[in-house]
Image (tube, rainbow, N blue to C red):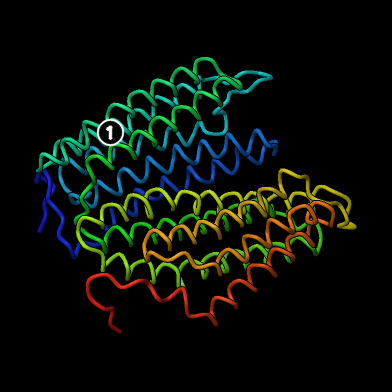
Amino acid sequence: MPTLRSRYLRTEAAHRTTSFEIFFDLVFVFALTRIVEFMARQPSGVALTRGLLLILLLWFSWSAYAWLGNEVRADVGLIRAGTLVAMAAMFLAALVIPDAWGDEEAGPRVPAPLILALAYGVVRGLHLVLYRYVSSSRQLSRTLRLIAVPALLGWSALVAGALLGGDTQTLLWALAFVIDVGGGRFASRYSPWQLRSVSHFTERHRLVIIIAIGESLISIGAGAGTELANWSVPVTALLGLVVAVCLWRLYFDRVAPAAERAFELAEEPRRGTIAGDAYSLIHFPLIAGIMYVALGIEEVLATLIHEPPDGHDALRMPAVVALYGGSAVYLGGRTLFLRLTTGRAPWLPLVGAGLALVLLPVAGLVPAMVALVLLVVVLIGQCEVERHASTLARPRKRGRPATG
């Protein structure tokens, strides 16, 4: 049994998510809530773009520690202590997220963009230090050295952007993630990551999808407010719940099990590639899509509450893009996920994504509540079509045939 005095304890193939990692995820869901709050202040194309950069920052912070927790137990000794420090830095970053680009009218009381950049540096730096500390192979040490270079360059761009502010900050932060993520992917191709526990890794990503969907429900509740302005508000909130249920089903009913079966059947060299591409990389658009949908539903509620009670006001285009574009990104991301795990690229998940994009301009012309109803119809239809299909549940066999 691991003790608090242990330096670290390496994981085994049957390792599962620990309660400490779930505790770590609470900070993640708080930060997601703050990002939706940031985008909802003044929804616009710029706000959606900046929100995407913040989701990127948060996602790759979380993903780094999912990898670390797969190598060694996250709840033991120095690893737990270091992860707690990273949690504190991530929590501080979440606190300042609503002012991530500063208050252009009055100016923030604290330098929020710089605090955010420095906190991200602490999270990433601690991850590399802890991973290097537990490294047991030359290949892993080489991978960490290669990744450290783009991580440092990307963080430098984050700090520079935080100091300059405005549109320059947006451009430099986008460049920072291109350097960090792109450099990291290149390094992992040259010196691949090694995965110790498939069950732990898939479970971590299942839980984070649930957390993101749960955050969307929090946003719906916040959008409804403490007083129900008219009958359409509770109805819309229930429609938002239906959307959340559909997003849950579209991942957990068939896609996740099919991907995990293929992951388990993969040979050892390929497992690290699947983990890095299908999980660490492709789960980002899934999370981003959920966050955008949450923002769109919150905007539907805001329109119903603050506009005249006849309910005929349409959503503004940024809200429509968030609602329908987020759904399309989520649905399309599942196809990439299946392609990278099962080796197949089923067309069926793309039907709902294409339909959401086709209906996007229409949704900007109809009342806000009707726009949400149309999306609910699309998602329910996608769920039912996939329920009666068989292609999603048949990953390409690798090694030995699947059983059960």
Residue 86 location (% of width, % of height):
31, 36
Identify the image quadrant of the N terminus: bottom left
Return the residue nearer the eye: 124 or 103: 124
Identify the image quadrant of the C terminus: bottom left
Residue at left offset 48%, top offset 80%: 390
Residue farthest to the top, as pictured? 164
Q: Which residue is mark 1?
A: 147
Near mark 1 (Cα within 10 A), the count class, few <14, some 14-19 or many ≥20, is many
Residue at left offset 13%, top offset 51%: 10
User: In the rendered view, does 268 fall on the left or right side of 255?
Assistant: left
Up the image or down, 296 lies above or below 137; here it is below
Up the image or down, 79 lies above or below 228; here it is above
How many numbered circles does the render carry? 1
Return the residue nearer the eye: 320 or 4: 320
Dot 1 amino acid type: Ile
Secondary element under disc 1, as helix, strand or loop, is helix
Residue 60 falls in image quadrant: top left
Residue 38 location (% of width, % of height):
60, 37
User: In the rendered view, does 72 fall on the left or right side of 352?
Assistant: left
User: In the rendered view, does 280 fall on the left or right side of 10?
Assistant: right
Residue 394 location (% of width, % of height):
40, 76
Residue at left offset 70%, top offset 70%: 377
User: In the rendered view, does 318 fall on the left or right side of 50?
Assistant: right
Up the image or down, 238 lies above or below 328; here it is below
Return the residue nearer the eye: 175 or 247: 175
Residue at left offset 33%, top offset 29%: 151
Residue 170 location (% of width, % of height):
56, 26
